[in-house]
Amino acid sequence: MPGFDALSPEAVLTAVETAFQCALQPLVTPFSSYVNRVYGLEAEDGTSYVAKFYRPERWSDVAIEEEHQFLQELHENDIPVVCPLADSDGESLAEVDIETSTGLHSHLFSLFPKRGGRLFDSEDDDSWRRIGALCGRLHSIGSKKKSSQRIVWTPELATSSHVKAILQEEILPRDLQNQFEDVTQEALETIKPLFQGVPLLRVHGDLHRGNILDRGEEGLLLIDFDDMAQGPAMQDLWLLLPGRRDETQRETALIAEGYEDFRPFPWEELSLMEPLRFMRMVHFIAWCARQRKDQDFSRHFPDWGSRGWWIREIEDLSDQKALFV
């Protein structure tokens, strides 16, 4: 992605200053994000910002705007999130053209106020109830509308297409293709019936504890809705737990206590926990396959795609499948 890799500090500063009509200090701090390019900025008046430049061809402008609309809905309902700022045209999504040797490349970006906090750590029973309550509030708003542009997190609409894309890329060693196809197809045939009739709502999509900040007296803050999806409530809940279903019954019960202050806990979706973990593993493989030619990919994932890597990955998928087949 020549244009994306060519985002220089000067280009970032110019793009943000032009779109948001602000004067920035000449300092750009890259954050550790591979999917998008994320930078810390500071205005001359001392205000701190975070600029997010979205990875090309990942989401359409309409899909990103849908995420921003969801954030605004959550904010209006007093759910602690960070909303993007409006540019000089009143829009939350701006665009910049970057000139490279391969031509002109357009990039979408947004600007957010910077919010600090420590990573959420579930230290006691009350912490689990707190995060359960926050998820209940999140899903209460998420259930009010549907997402039309984001991935639908079901085996048929997400994982099946991921498996197909991986096989079409022809990146597997030939003698391992059948093993990969067999393990994924057997798993999909088992889990597809489990999703029948399960309500789908707008979910965070990547709600591990690294995307929850604890701001002390201000409470918890949800960040990074980049993987927002239409999916079962359990897609957010299982990621919070410190182990597998049979290892986390106590934590699940505590989360449910807080959750049920705002909406019924989806006890009937507990059977989806390990299938959803399997789906996430396949999703990651497919994502890597799409990004493998990026300039920095091999630095972040040096062993990806080797024969040994595929053998380990198929073994991991097989082990995970054994938990529900």
Image (cartoon, rainbow, N blue to C red):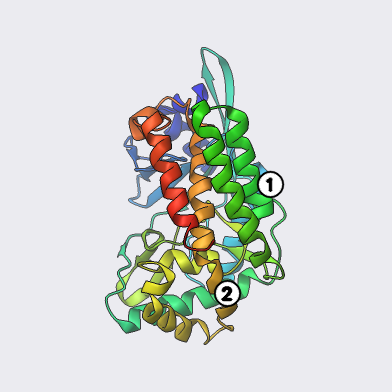
In the image, what residue type sits under mark 1?
Val
Judging depth in this view, the residue of 70 and 209 nearest the camera is 209
Left or right of 245: which side holds 42? Answer: left
Residue 62 tag number = 1
Residue 266 tag number = none
Q: Earlier in the sequence, mark 1 or mark 2?
A: 1
Name the secondary structure under disc 1. Answer: helix
Name the secondary structure under disc 2. Answer: loop
Q: Is there any visible trace of residue 75 in the rendered image?
A: no
Judging depth in this view, the residue of 294 and 317 nearest the camera is 317
Q: Are marks 1 and 2 in contact (CB under 8 Å)?
A: no
> In the image as oriented, which residue stretches furthest toward the left?
123
Spatial separation of the CA atoms under disc 1 and disc 2? 23 Å
Left or right of 300: which side holds 186? Answer: right
Quickly name the residue at label 2: 77
Taking the spot 37% from the left edge, 28% from the top edge, the residue there is 298
Image quadrant holding the C terminus, namely bottom right
Where's residue 212, x and y in %?
39, 64
Where's residue 126, x and y in %?
34, 83
Quadrant of the rendered structure where residue 154 is?
bottom right
Taking the spot 59% from the left edge, 78% from the top edge, the residue there is 268
In the image, what residue type sits under mark 2?
Asn
Where's residue 109, x and y in %?
53, 41
The residue mark sitting in front, 1 or 2, is 1
Where's residue 250, x and y in %?
37, 81
Q: Is there any visible trace of residue 179 in the rendered image?
A: yes
